[in-house]
């Protein structure tokens, strides 16, 4: 299972690099500076949390609570799809109503990191 997290994180990291390059080269002249900055936030947060998934895979065997690791991975995965995905759709299509779900992705990110803390905290 831990290799699954590493693989998923690596795929998300690969896509973040590709999407970042796409933004820098193909979108620079097509998007306003504000929209390009929003796109870059999506790419940056995707990369951060892709690395988080890789970290989960590397550390999972040392966790005190495996279920918390599983939930952490699920939440980081959901956060990438919802947070970064909604920013990509917003910037590439101009569909602003999807921007209302972006904070849900942010909450998923925060919750994923909380679950990582829980995974390594001893119960008393």
Image: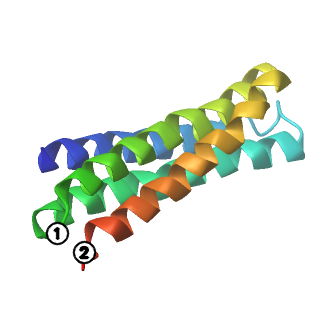
Q: What is the x, y in percent for residue 21?
A: 56, 43
Give the numbered dot on residue 21: none
Rendered residue at 24%/46% (across/down): 5
| Residue toward you, 54 or 30 | 54
Number of residues whose C-alpha sits closer than 10 Å to that of mark 2, classed few (under 14), some (14–19) or many (20 or more): few
Rendered position, 121 above or below 25: below
Labels 1, 2: front one = 2
Horizontal and vertical percent for residue 35? 83, 40
Residue at 69% across, 25% down: 89
Position of 89 with respect to 57 (left or right) is: right
Task: State the residue in front, 58 or 103.
Answer: 103
Indicate the quadrant where residue 88 lies. Answer: top right
Q: Dividing the image into 4 quarters, which one contains the C terminus?
A: bottom left
The answer to whether 44 is drawn above or below residue 88 in the figure is below
Relative horizontal placement of residue 110, taking residue 73 as reference (left or right): right
Q: CA distance from mark 1 to mark 2?
A: 9 Å
Return the residue found at the far front: 124
The residue carrying mark 1 is: 64
Q: Which residue is mark 2?
A: 123
Q: Nearer the viewer, residue 59 or 45?
A: 59
């Amino acid at each position: 299972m831990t290799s699954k997290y590493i693989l998923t994180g690596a795929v998300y990291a690969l896509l973040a690099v590709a999407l970042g390059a796409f933004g820098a080269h193909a979108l620079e002249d097509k998007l306003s500076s504000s929209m390009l900055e929003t796109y870059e936030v999506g790419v940056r947060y995707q990369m951060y949390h892709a690395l988080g998934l890789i970290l989960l895979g590397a550390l999972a065997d040392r966790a005190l609570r495996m279920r918390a690791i599983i939930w952490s991975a699920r939440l980081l995965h959901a956060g990438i799809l919802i947070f970064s995905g909604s920013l990509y759709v917003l910037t590439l299509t101009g569909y602003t109503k999807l921007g209302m779900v972006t904070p849900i992705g942010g909450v998923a990110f925060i919750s994923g990191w909380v679950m990582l803390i829980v995974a390594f905290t001893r119960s008393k």
